[in-house]
Amino acid sequence: MDFIILVGPAGSGKSTLTGELAGHIESYGPVVAKVNFDPAAENLSYDADVDVRRYVTVYEFMAKGLGPNGALVSAIDSLINYVFDIRGILEDIKPDYVIIDTPGQMELFAYRHGGPVVLDALTHGYNSIIVFLMDAIFFENPASIVSILTLASSVAVRLGRPQINIVSKADLLLPEVIDNVISRLGEEGFLESLISSSENIDIYTRALMLSLASSLYDAGFIGEVIPVSVNQPESLDALYAKIQQLLKCGDEYKYYDLRYERS
Ligand SMILES: Nc1nc2c(ncn2[C@@H]2O[C@H](COP(=O)(O)OP(=O)(O)OP(=O)(O)O)[C@@H](O)[C@H]2O)c(=O)[nH]1
Ligand SMILES: [Mg+2]
């Protein structure tokens, strides 16, 4: 049982991808369990094998006087009480993969303590990877690209697992953006050249962007960025191949380093 944890900003396509990727992987034979990890989810586009709303909802915390965001934080924290039950259900299903669909309020995972603690307890003893979704809309200009990649790196720091960064809803992108930007992001220095050639960025912002971009390359964080659309099965194939590549490292998988991939 390997865990694939989908993380990304609100509306980036996590829930849609949960259903579509699960179906896609299952078409090749493996069994996939789907976990709704969002206590505030309204309508789910897939049938969840485990739904945390069975254990906690934001409404019970709001009834105690918390606002919607505070209630979500408390709801996620309180999931620690149910991790044993959830693991039991998953171990009975015996899936090859478990896909976890997390809430869009991703500060729960990028900045707070509770989200990582619950995920650690849930995946303890099993291999787990992060798939970080960057909405296609972020690839319109260098400032947005730097800021979403920086957010992706915060998640990597907080969750401490191998991470695949994808561009979601890639069908909305012009082919030249995929060819000239996304497929070149892994080239060391590419982002800096994009920033340098952009106009209308003040000198201080440009210096900060260049510094952030170069740190991301220095750390080996920007490896292959995969464009994925749920409407393009070949892109789901590319994502599945990458997931298998990271997970197949078995016990050694934690030491897998994107840095070596770029050479
Ligand atoms: N064009 C296109 N639209 C997509 C794709 N994936 C998701 N969407 C749409 O994007 C919107 C948001 O998708 P969701 O799956 O609900 O996103 P989410 O990340 O789960 O959202 P939150 O749970 O609210 O954070 C929906 O209208 C989807 O139909 C895609 O690959 N291409
Ligand atoms: Mg969702």
Image: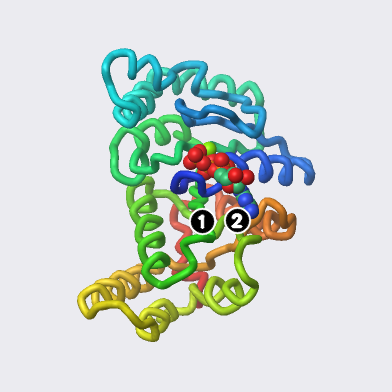
In the image, is residue 99 above or below residue 226? above
Relative to the observer, which residue lies in front, 183 or 28? 183
At mark 2, the secondary structure is loop
Residue 55 is labelled as: none
Callout 1 touching callout 2 (CB < 8 Å): yes
Q: Residue at x 49, y 56 (%)?
A: 134
User: Could you tell me how far apart the alpha carbons at marks 1 and 2 are, in whole angstroms?
Assistant: 6 Å
The residue carrying mark 2 has its beta carbon less than 8 Å from ligand 1: yes
The residue carrying mark 1 has its beta carbon less than 8 Å from ligand 1: no
Q: Position of residue 226 (x, y in %)?
A: 58, 63
Q: Position of residue 256 (x, y in %)?
A: 48, 59
Residue 66 shows up from this direction: yes
Q: Residue furthest front?
A: 200
> Crowding near pointer 1: few (<14 within 10 Å), some, many (20+)?
many
For residue 12, side relative to residue 49 (left or right) = left
Relative to the observer, which residue lies in front, 148 or 255? 148
Q: Residue at x 48, y 52 (%)?
A: 132
Residue 135 is labelled as: 1
The type of residue carrying mark 1 is Asp
Q: Quadrant of ligand 1?
A: top right
